[in-house]
Amino acid sequence: MQFDFDAGKYAIYVWPAFALTAAVFAWMIADSLGAARRWRREAERLQAERAKREARGS
Amino acid sequence: MAFSRWAAPMFGAIAAVLGIAGLILTFAAPEDYQQGDTVRMMFIHVPAASLSLFVYLCLGIASFLALVFRHALADAAAVACAPLGAAFTALALATGSLWGKPMWGTWWVWDARLTSVLVLLLFYLGYLALRSALEDEQKAARAAAILALVGLINLPIVKFSVDWWNSLHQGSSTLFAKPGNGLPPAYAWPMLVMSLAYLSAFGSLWLVRIRALVWRRKARALALQAAES
């Protein structure tokens, strides 16, 4: 199998297209994982606070 | 939640493996006799364009289920896929533009395919704007769901625009390709592998975003309880 990374005179179109694709995927992954982590931590923090309140109340 | 706990990483791993295989096949594919090396952009542009339509279909179905059955998970599924769909649509437009300049001699033309895809992007952005514009979340969900259903009309227009009108954009060369217009195996394989990679990546990220929204709902309910007590 031979690879051709030389896009010749089209390099100024081909490589930005691949770079843009990589950037969009990086944003989608970072934004999705970041939101999931942020809200899970927030829910767990509030759950722990509720457990503390309930322990104090009983 | 239990399904997404194992399915999201599984789809993510499949996407990574297929993505690497797709890139290997992309750069091992021969130059096209007419398009030269720009043909490699096909393997990142066409899957993004296909996903822009598929994700909108998911948005429409989820919005319909949320509107009719008032199911919270269907609403979460709709909200979760909209930013991903917008990203795939913007990517299809941008990579298409980068492909169009050397092949057509222009970055943009107001022809049926390009314009209908731009309208698709505006439907995604309109959906997201409507969700965040109204303070009452239920009202926002209902209004955005109706907008999403209206936008479904645009899907066949995007798909068949190249058949219904004279367009600079080529006709389908993958699924629904007319006889003689299909891709040769050297291009069909990277296209198939990259398409499956994009689809798996969407599946994984969609599930991650749905989980995030379920956690957000839980956090807000707990915050409300804390404020009341």
Image (tube, coloured by chain):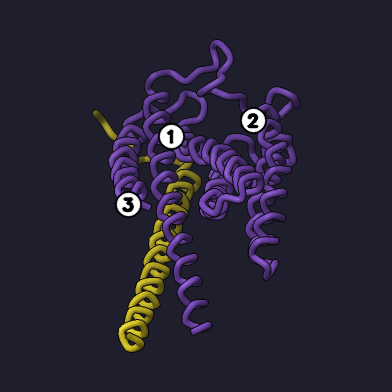
Amino acid type of the residue that numbered disc 1 sits on in the rendered structure: Ser
Amino acid type of the residue that numbered disc 2 sits on in the rendered structure: Lys
Q: CA distance from mark 2 to mark 1?
A: 17 Å
Q: Position of residue B118 (x, y in %)?
A: 68, 46
Q: Taking A23 as reference, is B32 above or below it? A: above
Q: Taking B7 as reference, is B164 above or below it? A: above
Residue positioned 64% across, 39% down in the render:
B105
Mark linked to residue B5 = 3
Element marked by disc 2: helix
Q: Position of residue B103 (x, y in %)?
A: 58, 35
The subunit letter for the residue under badge 2 reads: B
Q: Colour of chain B?
A: purple
Mark linked to residue B159 = 2
Q: CA distance from mark 3 to mark 1?
A: 24 Å
Q: Earlier in the sequence, mark 3 or mark 2?
A: 3
Q: Position of residue B61 (x, y in %)?
A: 59, 40
Element marked by disc 3: helix
Numbered disc in front, either 3 or 2: 3
Residues tagged by mark 3 and mark 2 found on one chain of the structure: yes
Q: Is residue B15 visible?
A: yes
